[in-house]
Structure formats: structure tokens, C-alpha cells
Image (cartoon, coloured by chain):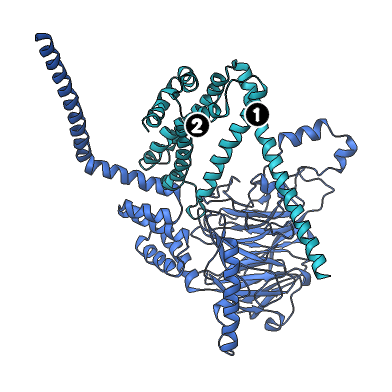
Amino acid sequence: MQKYLKSMAYGFHVITHPFDGFWDLKREKRGTLAAAVTFAVLTVLMLVVRKQGTAFLLNMNRLEDVDMMVDIITVGMLFILWCVANWCLTSLMDGEGKMQDIAIFTGYSLLPMLIIQFPLVVVSHMITAEEGTFYYVFTVISYLWTIALLVLGMMITHQYSMKKTLVTTVLTLVGMAIILFIALLFFSVIQQFLTFIVTAYKEIRFR
Amino acid sequence: MRKRQKILRIVSGLALAAGMLLFRGQEACASVMPYDTYSYDWWTEDVLQPHAYLYTESYAGNRFGSEMKTPQDMFFRDGFLYIADTGNNRILILTEAGEYVDEISEGLSGPQGVFVTKEHRVYVADSGNGRVVEYDEDKDVVREIGRPETDLIDASQNYVPTKVVVDDAGRIYVIAYGINMGLVEFNEAGEFQGFMGATQVTVSPFEYMWKTYFSTDAQKQRMETIIPTEYSNIFVDQSDFVYATISNLSDEDHLNGADAVRRLNPTGTDVLRRLGNYSIIGDLYSASDEAMWSSFTDIAATDYGCYFILDNAGGKVFCYDYDGNSLFIFGGMGSRNGLLRNPTSLVLNDDQSRLYILDAQLGSILGFDITEYGANLLGAMKAHYTGNTEQSDRLWREVLRENANSEVAYIGMGKISMREGDYQQAMDYFKLGNSRKYYTKAFEFYRKELMQTSFAKYMGVAIFLIAAVLLVSAGKKIKRWVGEVKCRNI
């Protein structure tokens, strides 16, 4: 428990000192998978709070249509897809990170979104539409920070050069798309196959 | 959401049918109108509204003596209806109850437009003869205004005026078939002045490159030429501004956000207020079975900025307020009483209590009477426009009592609350009316007020907290220092 809390707190060091932080996460065993998963769960929570709690002026969501499942699936699926695609690629491209290391650096990279966007929900209740620009600027900053951390985390975890990191990032995104495509294809084929069996069974029964 | 509405509609339809079986022979009620009245909300979903106008009766040939044949235009002035009975080459004059008064037929050939000034001088767009004719109160010809003398119109092109209006200053505006440079403007003396309010042509860069550099001459010839759209109808309002409608907008135009209605000031600049949630194009979606958008054929404006547009494609009437918000939409195509076949013209009487639609295929005039709800809604708009806060407050409440979904009513109530200085109440109303534009104004005032009244309180608490934290940390430091000194002394 002590280690878990310490590894959570270490996240603040990671996002401000990424080179040192990501190195220690892996090599000094400062990070835990539990903390990474916690950050992912908190991201889901952040999305839920943001969609429902943001002030009327800056909230374009229709509250009747807001669904928590959408957030859970988006974050969960993207997280797992990213980790799997990244692991598949980096194990072919001399990456040093194991599956667990990848999950950890990805989880820790989500922290800037949490520490910026949670307070923004509160701030949104105090600003007018014109001042909403500041709100959007900070939102964008949180996204950019997270993306930068993802790239740096990958570079340090796998001991890559910058160039190789960027190429791997693009390839990872392509890999994610391919996995998705195959998954959809798989489901569609299974579905057709099952329908065929059911239809054939019915035909035979009713003869 | 839509599905739920559909189910609701089916259920209510069944209930209605059962009710009708039970109470057969009872008076027809508002709910058996052959059309729905609806409006679009902030999420661009169509929401049913109470009826604003109900079909009451139609005037056909048997009422005033002779059948009409493809009538194209109608005008209302001081209790009389003037109809351009195009197929019979005459202008028919009826009372507002549909009784025959008079007709003008001498020398007319397929007149498609008619306008009557406040002095009861009748202007007719005599399309077949290529002229505009003016008649005095006794229906005698005063003058005729022929083809404009200009090189701007190709000599080989026929001049076929279809619609005509005259403003209070005596300027005459004419829409002519095939002339796409805008409205033809004549001065009081009938001399050609120029073209007004030409629609701007927009070409996408891609389209331009494709046409200029990559197409062969043969291809170019077969391609659609890019020409400005023509106006389909005009209406002059009480401040001499000309409302003009455009009917033939394509899918592409809709994608590019083209406008189908304009309000031209005397210099020809479009000054229509477009502050609504979406552009003024009638129905927001084309009918799903056939790609069909609303096609505006006529417009009638009230003197408080609300205007009614007639749609020839769906047989609907669209009512918009001064800002361009959709107030209500009703009507439809079909063969039942109260539905339309080929509507060509729409007029309102002076207090908007009755709306007349001229149908060319039916050859009749359909009268629609305003309901209490419609009167309250338009009355509230009028009261707001003239600055009568008390009355608009009362009427908005009436509107909300009958229609709790009315966004415009909530916005109207919000504006009143804001004027009274109750910003918190205004914020609530604007939220219900889904208007972020006004909400932010109310919020700004509310925040300012809050800061003025409670700034000292909050700041005091904040300073106290900061001081407490500082004291505690200072205390710790002192303690540590004392400890160190003690250690050293031992």
C-alpha cells in the first residue's frame, strides 16, 4: 500500500521531469502497474465529470444522451489497443520495454489531463463565454502535454532515438487501426457464420 | 429520441382514432388537422408545437362565380384580395370573405404578379406582354413600363416580368424571368435605374481549377455554367426594405450554407438578421425519400419583423422571428382539405389573424385562422419589438402555459428578467431556452453583482486562511530553530 501511494505521488515528478522520471519508472522500479491503471480509471472519471459538471456555457453535451459506458469503452479500448500495438511493434524493433513497462508509461502520461481538466470543470463555472478561450487553451495544453509525455515515455522506456520514436509512434497508430479492422472483420465473419449455422439448423428442422 | 417521438405519435394517433369512434359526430377539433405544427430546437430536432394556424375554409370558383386557372400571385390590401389569375389573363379582386368585387382583364396576357399601393393603385406584371402596367383606383390604365432600356440585357433575350413591388417612395422593383443580375429597379417616373441586390456567385477553388485548367472545351460546354440564382418572389415591408426569396437551391448550395431569404435595404445590401441557431432554409433536412429541400415561392412580413415563408416543395409555411429563429412550421402536400398541391402565394391580413394561401393547381385560396396560441406568440413578439415589456411578459407566460418546449418564449422571458435586473432568474430562463449567447450576458452581470456584494466576505476568508497557513509554518520554523539552539547548547 505504501509503495502504491508512493508510486502515485511519483507521477508528479514524472510529468515535470520526464527524462529522469520515465527512466526511474522502469529501471528504479518507482512505478507500479496499479498506479497506471488508477490513472486510466481516473481519466474515465474525469471524462464523466467533465461531460456532466462543466458549466452550461461551455458544455455542449446533451445531458440526456451522456453515457458513462462510452467513456469507459473509449479510454479502456484505446489504452489496451495502444499498449498491445506498441508492444507488438517494439518487440520487433529492439525495444527494451516489456508489456508492463509500456502500460506504466502510458498510464503515467495521462496525469497532466487529470490535474488540468479536473480544476477546469470548477473554473468553467466562474467564466463567461468570452473568457472561455482560456478554458480551451488549457484543455489543449493538457492534451499536448499528454502527447509529449507519451512520445518521451516511449523513447526512454525503449531506449530509442527521437527519430525512431516518431516512426514507431506513427507505426503504432497504424497498428491500432489494423487491429481494429481485423477485430471488426472477425466479429462480422463470426456473426455471418453463426447466422448460417442457425439458418441451416432451422431449414433442416422444418423439413 | 426520434423513435420515441414516432411511437408517441402512433400511440396518440390510435388514442385519437378510438376517441373519434366513441364521440362520433362531435365537432372537429384542432387535433384532426391534416398537418403537424412543429419547430426546430437547439439540437436541430423537430419538436411538435401547438397549432398556430388552423385551416378553416377555401374559396374556390363556386364562391366568386368563375374558376381560376393556374393563379400565380396574390396581394392583400385593406380587406381586399388581388389575385393574378394567370391562366385566365385577368386580375381578380375579391373581398377578404371571398366575394367577387371586380376584375381587370383588358389587354393582359398571362399576368404573374400583382401589387397594390396604399393609394390603391394596382401594379400588374403583365408577363406575356413584357411590361408592367399601373392602374388607378378606378382600374383605368395610367401607364405602362416596358422593357428596360439598357445594354445590360442581351437583345435576343425576352423580357418577362413575373413579380412587381412598389415602395413608399415610388421605386418599382421587378423580378424578370431569366435575368439573374438581381431585381430590376425603376424610379418613380418609370425610368430604368439599374439592378439591385444581385446574388453573389461563390465558386470553390477546386471547382474553379477544375473548370479552367483540366476540362476540355467539349466538357466545359456540357458543364453547368455558374450563374447567380434568381429571386423567386419579393415583398416590401413597412420600412421600404425588400424581402426576397430564392427557390432553386441545390444540395451543394445547402452544403455551402447558402441563404434562401434576403432583406435588401434600398442600396441592395442584405440586412436580414441571422442570429438564429441555423440558417433560414426552411426544413433542415431534405425529405428522406427524395433529395428535396424547401423551395421558397413567397414571403410575407409583419411590421414587427416576423416573416412567413411559403414552401412550394413541401407545401409548408415557415414563420421566423426578427432574429431568424424558427417560431413554427405547418402545412403539407396532399389532397385532404387544408393540404396543398402547388402553392404559389401567401398573404396575411393586417393583424395576422388570417393567412391566405393561393394554390395554382387547386385553383383556390385556402384560409387559415390564427389560434389563441399563435396569437399569443406573435403578440408577444410584437410587444417585445415595440418595447411593451409588461404585455410581452404576460403573453410569454401564456405561450409557456400552452407549450413548455418553446425556446423563444424562454428567451423572451429571460430578456424581461434581465431588464428587471434579476440576473439569476434570467440565467435560468436562458438555460431553458438553450441560448448561450444571452446566458453569458446575464452571467456576466450576475457575477459582477456577486463580486460587489460578497467580495469583502470571500476575500476576508481567503486572507484569514493564508495568514493561518503562514503562521503555522512560521511557528514550525521557530520551533525548529529553538530546538537547534537548544541542541547546540547541550
Q: Quadrant of residue B139?
A: bottom right
Q: Is residue B386 above or below residue B267?
A: below
For residue A150, the mark is none
Taking depth in this image into account, of B86 and A109 the one nearest to the observer is A109
Q: Position of residue B325 (x, y in %)?
A: 52, 55
Q: Which residue is mark 2?
A: A107
Q: Are marks 2 and 1 in contact (CB under 8 Å)?
A: no
Q: Is residue A26 left or right of residue A3?
A: right
In the rendered image, which quarter contains the N terminus of chain B?
A: bottom right
Q: Which secondary structure, mark 1?
A: helix
* Chain identifier, blue in the render: B
Taking depth in this image into account, of B307 and B460 the one nearest to the observer is B460
Q: Which color is chain A depicted in?
A: cyan
Q: Which residue is mark 1?
A: A88
Check disc 2 and give the amino acid type.
Answer: Gly
Q: Residue furthest bottom?
A: B25
Q: Which secondary structure, mark 2?
A: helix
Q: Is residue B163 above or below residue B79?
A: above
Which of disc 1 and disc 2 is earlier in sequence?
Answer: 1
Q: Position of residue A10 (x, y in %)?
A: 40, 25
Check disc 1 and give the amino acid type.
Answer: Cys
Q: Position of residue B490 (x, y in %)?
A: 9, 10
Q: Is residue B190 above or below residue A107?
A: below
- Which chain contains the residue that carries disc 2? A
* Residue at the image position 52 percent from the left and 44 percent from the top: A72
Q: Is residue A33 left or right of residue A126?
A: right
Labels 2 and 1 share a subunit:
yes
Q: Position of residue B58 (x, y in %)?
A: 65, 78
